[in-house]
Image (cartoon, grey):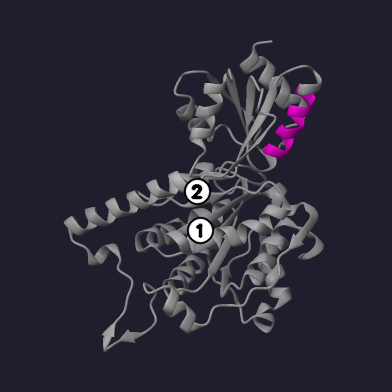
Amino acid sequence: MGELKLMKGNEALAEAAIRYGADAYFGYPITPQSEVIEYLSEQNPYERTGMVVLQAESELAAINMVYGAGASGKRVMTSSSSPGVCLKQEGLAYIAGAEIPCVFADVVRGGPGLGTIQPSQADYFQNTKGGGNGDYRNLVLAPASVQEMCDFVALGFDLAFKYRMAACILSDGAIGQMMEKVVLPDQKPRMTDEEIKAKYPWAINGRKNGTQHRIITSLDLDSAKMEEHNIHLQKKYKEIEEKEVRYEMINCDDAEYVFVAYGSSARIAQKSVQLGREAGLKVGLLRPITLWPYPTKAIDALIKKGVKGFLSVELSCGQMIEDVRLACNGRVKAEHFGRVGGIIHTPEEVLEAMKKQIIGE
């Protein structure tokens, strides 16, 4: 049994990184995720576990530090909020091309541009569709509680190293700032250099037999090999789509209409389900936990069971709705409801949107 504490989501994420045995965190402060680096600095994890915490001079510097440390097989992470993640996209594309495992958290605020420091979910495209240049994906986990902010650090690292790619923990200002009880995991030891060499033969660890061991980047490849490398990446992504989809269904067994929501919107939509059921409506909730890979097959299965329509509930002008509609493929109605500018929808207005846009009341 782990330790029970009352923590902010950002603090739980930071503490989970220490307890996972992460080697380093490189970051830069930006609201509403500054508590991550503040907590790590206050905890001084180098004294606890040997974990390095460094505030870089910029987001660009931080992601390239992650790139370098990750290439040596170290368990490294960073975090930021929406404008800062924009600045990290070049490094994330390089990380994808070189197949470097790492974890990054995006505690989303409003935009476009500098926007507002209030909660938003408008970074869905930025993280699920790649963000940087080229054909690549990031694993994307969407926590809906402080407990999941903690739990998804370990899950993110495990998946990142399993598939040699970046794993994103896509949170928002509400989840990052709220306080809830959280059960923290027991402390894991950091891996030794010898353990890293034995477990990750791809990692940079000095010269071998007089030959330099290095990560291959796109600059090392001619056109034919570059095509081969991209085909290899797409094959890996296809495997992930088959094996790593995660989601939660609430009251969907007999549902005729289903809310689709993640993160803080899912918490609100869950109350909307309760209110709808009390009013005699057969409504349910599909909560994607992985935003990529997306639970397309879960939506397909619900349609085959008789679900008549879906309402995508988002703190955005409508981004996830595109994946919902792709899954529906025109067979049933799929519409979007959202609030922006830092305004958070209420369970009552979410239910009302379902009635008007999907049920037709």
Quarter-wise, where is residue 157 in the image?
bottom right
Task: Name the element at disc 2.
Answer: loop
Magenta residues: mostly which secondary structure? helix
Q: Residue at 30% of width from left, 54% of height from top?
A: 232
* Place of residue 20 in the rendered image (x, y in percent of width and height, measured from the top left): 62, 69
Quarter-wise, where is residue 36 in the image?
bottom right
* Place of residue 309 in the rendered image (x, y in percent of width and height, measured from the top left): 58, 20
Q: Which residues are magenta?
A: 266-276
Residue 282 is covered by the magenta coloring = no
Q: Residue at 73% of width from left, 75% of height from top?
A: 43
Quarter-wise, where is residue 45 in the image?
bottom right
Distance, label 1 to label 2, CA atoms, is 9 Å
Report which residue position mark 2 lands on: 244
What's the residue type where badge 1 is placed? Answer: Leu
Q: Is residue 117 above or below residue 298?
A: below
* Place of residue 88 in the rendered image (x, y in percent of width and height, measured from the top left): 48, 59
Q: Residue at 64% of width from left, 11% of height from top?
A: 360
